[in-house]
Image: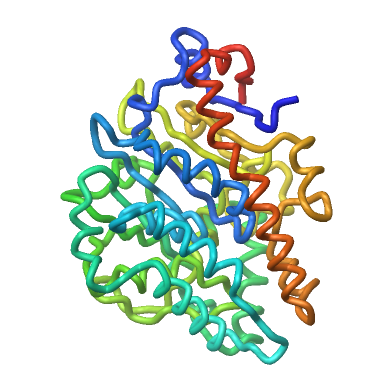
């Protein structure tokens, strides 16, 4: 039984059924804000990286918020696969205690970033010809910017209530800010539906932007006044763009690759409990979504994909969490090779499902 399932939007499905999947057709690879769930994508990422499968004929946009941005920051580094493995090891091995505060957790995040992003390599990363990184963040508005947890929680409660009525209400509480490298912003920033700003990455703001993209509200302190961007407190990009909420294809026949941890796609962090909230058809048109089958998930430690609850579950025994996460990453290692085999054999045409 296959460890993978593949679903495709309308245009992507037609492209795959007609001629198969070709890596040169991929113009964007998207990484969602999924917390530790990204670990099941690690084998997929490393297969793409070590095989030089993306960006061979043109630069590919690596677009991510939170964990997605953290993953893709490694792709731009010298010896990218080694950088990615250092990131994975530092992320899994990080230890948190009951005494941690949002400020101390932010400091530990900085240590993780420092383990795989070297300051003297940032000029190399920013000049990368194969990959174009886009880091999605949320610049807090009003009391969402407060580091006083009661005030921040109250603001987020109001945000949740108004977001339940309409996703457009989110912009009362946060502004999307996309940090990008390359000569111009990614194509999705020029779509009529795009709301927010875009700021070019540089050697000064690179780490701060990536760190801010994973600064989970109430859990991690925000990153203040990022160089080159409007003043303010920057938080997790998943607050606005949790899973997938934009059409990332540059052109009609382009494909958007998306390795996800589940079948459901949730636009924003506050949409998790709103079952009706989902991306529209146009957003998904060019998407090829790869995700683990239930039979694969059942084989993982505790029969589930690693998630943020594991930090609390194993707060007094972090060694158990670290062991489980290493095991999950190890079991996920072959998923990229399995996808590659489906592509090369042409069997992807037979198993791809419509979104």
Q: Residue 95, percent across and down?
A: 63, 79
Residue drawn where x is 76% and y is 49% of the image: 300
Q: Up-down: is 57 above or below 152? A: above
Q: Up-down: is 34 above or below 251? A: below
Q: Residue 123, percent across and down?
A: 19, 64
Q: Residue 335, percent across and down?
A: 60, 37
Front-most of 2 and 266?
2
Residue 297 appears left or right of 248: right
Residue drawn where x is 44% and y is 9% of the image: 19
Front-most of 258 and 338?
338
Image label count: 0
Residue 206 appears left or right of 291: left
Q: Residue 354, percent across and down?
A: 61, 21
Q: Up-down: is 95 above or below 239? A: below
Residue drawn where x is 63% and y is 45% of the image: 332
Residue 308 appears left or right of 313: left
Quadrant housing the C terminus: top right
């Amino acid at each position: 039984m296959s460890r993978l399932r593949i679903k495709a939007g309308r245009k992507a499905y037609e492209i795959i059924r007609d001629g198969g999947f070709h890596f040169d057709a991929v113009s964007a690879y998207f990484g969602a804000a999924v917390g530790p769930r990204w670990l099941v994508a690690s084998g997929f990422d490393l297969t793409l990286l070590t095989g030089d499968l993306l960006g061979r004929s043109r630069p590919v946009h690596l677009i991510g918020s939170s964990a997605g941005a953290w993953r893709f920051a490694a792709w731009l580094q010298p010896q990218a696969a080694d950088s990615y493995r250092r990131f994975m090891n530092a992320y899994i091995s990080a230890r948190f205690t009951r005494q941690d505060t949002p400020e101390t957790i932010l400091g530990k995040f900085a240590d993780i970033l420092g383990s795989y992003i070297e300051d003297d390599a940032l000029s190399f990363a920013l000049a990368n010809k194969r990959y174009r990184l886009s880091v999605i963040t949320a610049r807090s508005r009003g009391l969402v910017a407060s580091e006083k947890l009661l005030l921040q929680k109250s603001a987020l409660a109001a945000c949740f209530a108004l977001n339940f009525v309409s996703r457009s209400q989110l912009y009362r509480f946060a502004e999307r800010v996309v940090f990008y490298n390359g000569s111009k912003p990614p194509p999705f920033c020029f779509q009529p539906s795009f709301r927010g700003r875009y700021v070019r990455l540089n050697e000064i703001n690179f780490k701060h932007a990536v760190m801010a993209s994973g600064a989970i509200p109430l859990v991690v302190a925000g990153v203040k006044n990022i160089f080159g961007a409007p003043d303010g407190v920057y938080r997790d990009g998943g607050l606005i763009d949790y899973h997938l909420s934009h059409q990332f294809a540059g052109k009609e026949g382009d494909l958007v690759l998306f390795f996800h941890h589940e079948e459901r796609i949730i636009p924003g962090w506050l949409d998790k409990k709103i079952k009706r909230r989902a991306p529209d058809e146009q957003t998904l048109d060019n998407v090829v979504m790869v995700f683990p089958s239930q039979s694969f998930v059942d084989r993982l430690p505790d029969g589930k994909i690693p998630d943020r609850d594991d930090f609390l579950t194993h707060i007094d025994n972090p060694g158990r969490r670290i062991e489980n996460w290493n095991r999950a990453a190890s079991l996920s290692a072959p998923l990229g090779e399995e996808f590659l085999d489906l592509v090369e054999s042409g069997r992807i045409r037979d198993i791809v499902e419509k979104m």
